[in-house]
Image (spheres, grey):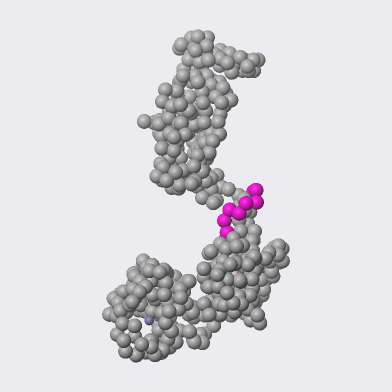
Amino acid sequence: MFTSRSRSHGRAWRLRHVLPAVACVAVPALAWAIVIQVEDPGRAAQASPRDLEAAVPARHFINVASTADHILEERARNRRRDTEVQVRSGDTMMGLLQRAGVGRSEAYRAIEALKKVYSPRDIRPGQAIHLALLHDETGLETDSTARLAEMRLRASVERDVKVARNGDGFVAESVERSLSRGVAGARGEIRSSLYVASEQRNVPVAVILEMIHGFSFAIDFQRDLRRGDRFEVVYEAFREAGGQLAKTGPLLYASLDQQGNSLEMYRYETSDGEVDYFTPKGESVRRLLMRTPVDGARLSSGYGMRKHPILGYSRMHQGIDFAAPRGTPVYAAGNGKVEYAGRNGGYGNYIRIRHNGSFKTAYAHLKGFAKGVHGGARVRQGEVIGYIGTTGSSTGPHLHYEVLKGGGHVNPRSLDLPTGRTLRGKELARFQQVKADIDRLRDGLPETRIAQASCGDGGAKAKAKVC
Ligand SMILES: [Zn+2]
């Protein structure tokens, strides 16, 4: 079986080596072909290959072939049919092309060409594949009902892939899509939950998580978020030429207005390349430790004296418990070095991280550890270190989280943690410039309001719930 490469190589070889040798006899035949095309295109379009064969002596035919191909393709172009095929579950590229009516050897050559720029295994159910098919009735095709003129598909948000017929073979090319970079935003009032409110404005989940992560150093989203709180997010948005949203980028700005307590943060890349969120005054929103090392979890048990759920007697609960489904990712609360990751008696699968000279955090009852998390490994704040489980002395899937300060346990919820980086001098001036740019973008966004979400929980003072 020829690949598209050997095919096109074969054609080039033929042109280079055969054509000069017979050029003298080929000229009249080529001239004839050109004449009928120019003088009577209608007649050329009607000429069958049998007519050409009859008009040109057999020994000349090898050189006329490309001209004849050309005429046939001219004809076939009139019968080109453009269609879009959806990838079905379990589809292969070969199966899909054959279903569209492309013959097996034709499909094979097209797929071989495609492989140079895109792996056909990457097609996904629901993906649209654009095909241009040539239905010719010349009788020359023996192995197919349709010839493929072109195939196009979206390889990624930024890239299209095109396979086009080139004689008997195919050539593939990768086409970068030009997306224009801009911003999108949403403002609204929280009626039931931040998730519901943002969903109604089509704010990507990743953007909302960035906002929660950024503000989670200052407020407790489970305890402190209330009905009537107002929020705003502005994030990068990439649009296609037609204006449709192609993809979204990072959160640039977020605010949370809690009746008297207002929080704002701006994304800023410092001159040493660190990307972080800063308050309008240029203070990093980041603290040494995150308040909650897991997203969307319910605080199921606080810090302090309590009756042990399994052993029955009262004892000190040296951490706090977050209930969440098995497998929920657990984050490193702060930058640091893993002191221990492994089995630890009643703690089950357990990780302890040393953050600095005085602070450590510990995570217990994990289902398992994230890849690369072992004693001595460096971890960054917010990095996934393990997954919620119920190993050791545990009654159900939850994270037992401890903070140790100077060797003793402290309540993770009432920590006064050191603040992060504060921008000064030239760096602060540079930040103020970026902040002014983001504020201008915010002013340009249309005022949008969020309709009331019905989440089933009554009472104006009801706490926000994830629903
Ligand atoms: Zn616990």
Residue 436 visible? The answer is yes
Q: Quadrant of ligand 1?
A: bottom left
Total of numbered circles in the picture?
A: 0
Residue 289: percent from the left, percent from the top? 48, 80
Q: Is residue 264 visible?
A: no
Residue 242 place in picture, x, y as percent: 65, 48
Residue at 51% over, 87% down: 416
Range of magenta residues = 241-253
Image quadrant of residue 10?
A: top left
Q: On screen, 1 above or below 299?
A: above
In this rendering, the answer to whether 96 lies above or below 124 is: above
Q: Is residue 246 magenta?
A: yes
Q: Point out residue 323 in the picture as x, y percentages from the top left corner.
A: 41, 75
- Residue 347: name its quadrant: bottom left
- In the rendering, at what x and y percent does residue 285 appear? 56, 77
Residue 169 within the segment the image draws in magenta: no
Please report the residue visible at 56 percent of the width from the left and 62 percent of the height from the top. 204
The foreground one among 448 and 77 is: 448
Q: Residue at x 44, y 35 (%)?
A: 99
Which residue shows up at 53% across the image and 38% down it? 84
Is residue 73 positioned above or below 270 on the image?
A: above
Magenta segment, prevailing SS (helix, strand or loop): strand
